[in-house]
């Protein structure tokens, strides 16, 4: 979990007749159902209810799909009876004209069944894709409305996984599994009914194989699940090693640790290979085992049916159709077993999606107001705040900033500097006390209007995979190209932008990875300048800029700060000598405040910080 910031799928014998219905879902191997121990939904009833809200919008289409499944299953149930009729009424009596009609009817049924299988698959795909389209939109919209603390306390990869992988599991599983389950249940029930009408004795003998089938399958499946689960964990470890090595190539080469990294990769890769082989061996037992049991059922039907036919209790055609039903009977059983874990996994994934949808959104006061502009007067009154209850990060913080003043926040790492500006931006709400802007409690100001009056440049600059000018224009979407260029010039970013392959139209990739850290910071500064904020927040905004560029940027920043209240978080104390007010933060408290000269004269905490950076030893 991301820490809270200190601040801030089986083979068949050759005898098996063609099976009706859709085949296995794409992308599944023999052991797909054992790929991992399935996650179980915690509240299945509620999850089904909420899923129906998305799928229920397509009731008419779902009803049509269900009718197609019924017709397709009926064809599948009736088709073996045609085999019986063909043998008993036409082949044995040697009536070839009638045989031709039966064969023609079977061909038509096979074709119709294939068409219906396609229709039901296509229809369910449409329903599932449209449903998860809305679900995905709803989840993404939700992410825009939840507080920053959710992003700070949850791994970003986990949130992304819910938006992509979990919703894909819901879509792919429900589109393939629901039709398969309905078809299997109907076919199973219909087949048993017809088998009982043909020969109750043969039906009972055939069903003797079922307990054996389930028992052996579950015995192997339990072992296979564990192996595949271990395989997935090792695969995650291998991915982690790969990611670390790719990201940390410079460090690896500097310390000449290539050999160590190769050995580490080989250890994990070897273990993954060994577990993968064992898992595939066990999962590979299932198809031949099912084939063996199917052949056992065939032997039982053939031997018993032959005896009954010789005694005159049944006909040869009945035996032939019964063999077909025995085959047809086991297929839906296998399908249901295959789909059980998949469905469980889909519901569990849906729960993970709904879990984020149920997160509390940013609170809005009933009497909150909209503000068009701010003067910039800021006051903290006895502010207490904690990320985790009972562990205060800020303790009784009080200070007053006049409009237009430059305020510097200094102090050790983890003292609470970034937390102060997080509260000012209402990324978090305080536990007690008040934060006033222009005399108004910020909890009564809508977040949107408040943040429109704030300009923030963070130490870790984030740029979008868009043209340079659009990254700058993000500060004010209505800005003209000329205004974008002017903002870039003010931030001293114009010259390096001009030398990019396509100038301001150069598309940045991977968050601006093709730019230096300093260049990314300059673009972030230009973005803030373009937003023309009443209150400016600079969190180590010049930390990644070389000394020469820093001086130019500081000059531009001084112009930008004129007439604006500015909060500057700085570790290099040389950058805040001209601040109107310096707040010295330590252990979540303001231990000193004043100008640079005043604080030096006190020879206190700030003096020691300053001397530790600039004293000549």
Image (spheres, helix red, strand yellow):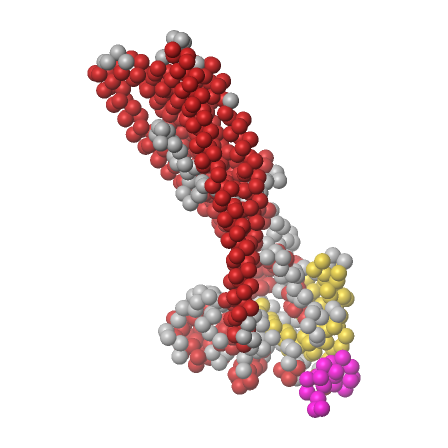
In the rendered image, the quadrant that contains the C terminus is bottom right
Relative to 450, does residue 605 appear above or below in the rendering? Answer: below
Whether residue 500 can be seen here: yes
Q: Position of residue 407 (x, y in %)?
A: 66, 76
Q: Which residues are magenta?
A: 598-617
In the rendered image, the quadrant that contains the N terminus is bottom right
| Magenta-drawn stretch, dominant element (helix, strand or loop) | helix
Instruction: Residue lying at the far left in this picture: please name it.
Output: 97
Quadrant in the rendering for residue 379: bottom right
* Residue occupying image coordinates x 54% and y 42%: 224
Is 611 included in the stretch rendered in magenta? yes
Whether residue 565 can be seen here: no
Classify residue 527 as left or right of residue 413.
left
Is 427 included in the stretch rendered in magenta? no
Front residue of 350 and 84:
84
* Residue occupying image coordinates x 56% and y 52%: 233
Quadrant in the rendering for residue 441: bottom right
């Amino acid at each position: 979990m991301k820490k809270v910031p200190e601040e801030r799928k089986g083979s068949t014998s050759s005898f098996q007749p063609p099976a009706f219905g859709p085949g296995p879902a794409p992308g599944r191997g023999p052991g797909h159902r054992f790929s991992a121990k399935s996650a179980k939904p915690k509240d299945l009833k509620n999850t089904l209810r909420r899923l129906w809200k998305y799928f229920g919008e397509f009731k008419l289409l779902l009803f049509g799909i269900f009718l197609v499944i019924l017709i397709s299953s009926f064809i599948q149930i009736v088709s073996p009876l045609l085999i019986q009729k063909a043998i008993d009424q036409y082949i044995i009596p040697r009536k070839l004209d009638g045989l031709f009609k039966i064969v023609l009817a079977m061909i038509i049924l096979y074709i119709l069944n294939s068409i219906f299988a396609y229709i039901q698959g296509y229809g369910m795909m449409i329903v599932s894709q449209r449903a998860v389209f809305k679900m995905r939109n709803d989840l993404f919209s939700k992410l825009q409305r939840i507080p920053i603390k959710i992003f700070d306390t949850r791994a970003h990869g986990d949130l992304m996984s819910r938006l992509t992988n979990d919703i894909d599991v819901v879509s792919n599983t429900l589109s393939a599994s629901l039709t398969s389950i309905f078809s299997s249940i109907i076919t199973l029930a219909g087949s048993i009914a017809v088998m009982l009408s043909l020969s109750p004795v043969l039906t009972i003998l055939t069903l003797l194989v079922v307990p054996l089938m389930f028992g052996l399958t579950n015995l192997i499946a339990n072992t296979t699940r564990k192996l595949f689960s271990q395989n997935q964990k090792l695969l995650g470890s291998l991915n982690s090693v790969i990611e670390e090595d790719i990201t940390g190539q410079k460090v690896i080469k500097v310390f000449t640790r290539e050999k160590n990294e190769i050995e580490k990769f080989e250890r994990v890769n070897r273990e993954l290979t060994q577990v993968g082989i064992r898992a595939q061996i066990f999962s590979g037992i299932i198809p031949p085992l099912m084939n063996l049991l199917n052949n056992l059922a065939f032997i039982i039907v053939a031997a018993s049916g032959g005896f009954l036919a010789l005694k005159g209790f049944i006909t040869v055609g009945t035996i032939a159709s019964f063999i077909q039903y025995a085959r047809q009977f086991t297929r839906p059983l296998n399908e249901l077993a295959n789909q059980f874990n998949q469905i469980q996994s889909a519901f569990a994934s849906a729960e993970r999606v709904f879990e984020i949808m149920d997160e509390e959104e940013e609170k809005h006061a009933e009497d909150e107001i909209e503000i068009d502009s701010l003067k910039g007067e800021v006051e903290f009154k006895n502010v207490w705040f904690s990320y985790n209850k009972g562990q205060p990060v800020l303790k009784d913080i009080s200070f007053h900033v006049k409009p237009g003043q430059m305020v510097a926040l200094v102090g050790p790492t983890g003292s609470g500097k970034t937390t102060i500006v997080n509260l000012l931006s209402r990324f978090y709400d305080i536990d007690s006390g008040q934060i006033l802007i222009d005399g108004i409690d910020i909890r009564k100001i809508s977040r949107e209007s408040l943040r429109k009056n704030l300009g923030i440049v963070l130490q870790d600059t984030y740029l979008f995979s868009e043209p340079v000018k659009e990254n700058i224009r993000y500060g004010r979407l209505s800005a003209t190209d000329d205004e974008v260029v002017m903002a870039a010039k003010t931030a001293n970013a114009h010259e390096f932008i001009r030398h990019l392959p396509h100038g301001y139209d150069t598309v940045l990739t991977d968050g601006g990875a093709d730019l230096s850290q300093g260049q990314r910071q300059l673009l972030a500064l230009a973005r803030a300048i373009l937003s023309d904020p009443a209150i400016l927040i600079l969190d180590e905004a010049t930390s990644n800029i070389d000394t020469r560029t820093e001086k130019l940027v500081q000059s531009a920043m001084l112009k930008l700060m004129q007439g604006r209240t500015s909060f500057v978080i700085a570790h290099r104390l040389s950058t805040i000598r001209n601040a109107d007010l310096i707040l010295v933060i330590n252990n979540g408290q303001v231990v000193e405040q004043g100008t640079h000269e005043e604080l030096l004269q006190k020879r206190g905490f700030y003096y020691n910080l300053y001397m530790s950076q600039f004293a000549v030893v």
